[in-house]
Image: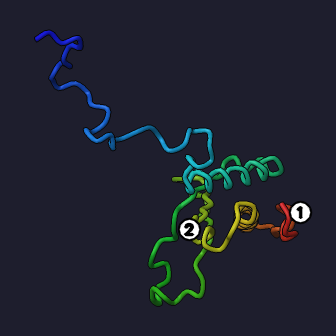
Amino acid sequence: MDSPVPPLPAGPGPRRRDRHGRGMRGPVAPPQVPLSTSRAAAFGDLVQDSVERLERRWPQLAEVDFLVLDVPPAGGDDSGPYAAESVPLGGMIAATSAHPARIVIYRRPVEIRTKSRDERAMFVHEIIVEQVAELLGLSPESVDPRYGDGQD
């Protein structure tokens, strides 16, 4: 019998979908849409924006490492795991000969305490200002005159 359509070659070629059409498809959202940005990446962007804003006023902050960790390390207090009254939102590690000064922001405790992106941005900036003030030995108001205003 002569068939007008030639049969498909059988072989180990790449399959795009499984036989019911339920296989992998394209990404859910294009890369330029905010949906494709993870929460951790968005939080890192908030920290970076705040750091850039402070570096314009305090150029010496270019030598400080700013880190974002998901949660604070366990066992920070010797009197027991539940002895601390509150969870730290950030921390500062002074410079040594081995590494520069570091300021750490803990993402999950900050996200839990805020509801919107704007509120989170303001809260992150306040935490960074407090840690920079501790590092520089100044008051938070002298590091950023708008500290505590409730506006960004």
Residue shown at 44% from the left, 37% from the top: 26
The disc label shown at residue 66, or none: none
Which secondary structure, mark 1?
A: loop
- The vertical placement of 59 against 120, above or below, is above
Q: Residue at x 56, y 38 (%)?
A: 30
The answer to whether the residues at label 1 and label 2 have Cβ atoms under 8 Å apart is no
Q: Nearer the viewer, residue 143 or 96?
A: 143
Name which residue type carries label 2: Arg
Q: What residue did someone put label 2 on?
A: 108
Residue for point 45% across, 85% down:
81
User: How far apart, in angstroms, are the residues tagged by discs 1 and 2?
Assistant: 27 Å
Q: Quadrant of the C terminus?
A: bottom right
Give the camera-side residue of 55 and 36.
36
Q: Residue at horizontal 45%, vertical 79%?
A: 75
Asked if residue 90 shows in the view, the reply is: no
Extreme residue in the front direction: 1
Which image quadrant is residue 149 in?
Answer: bottom right
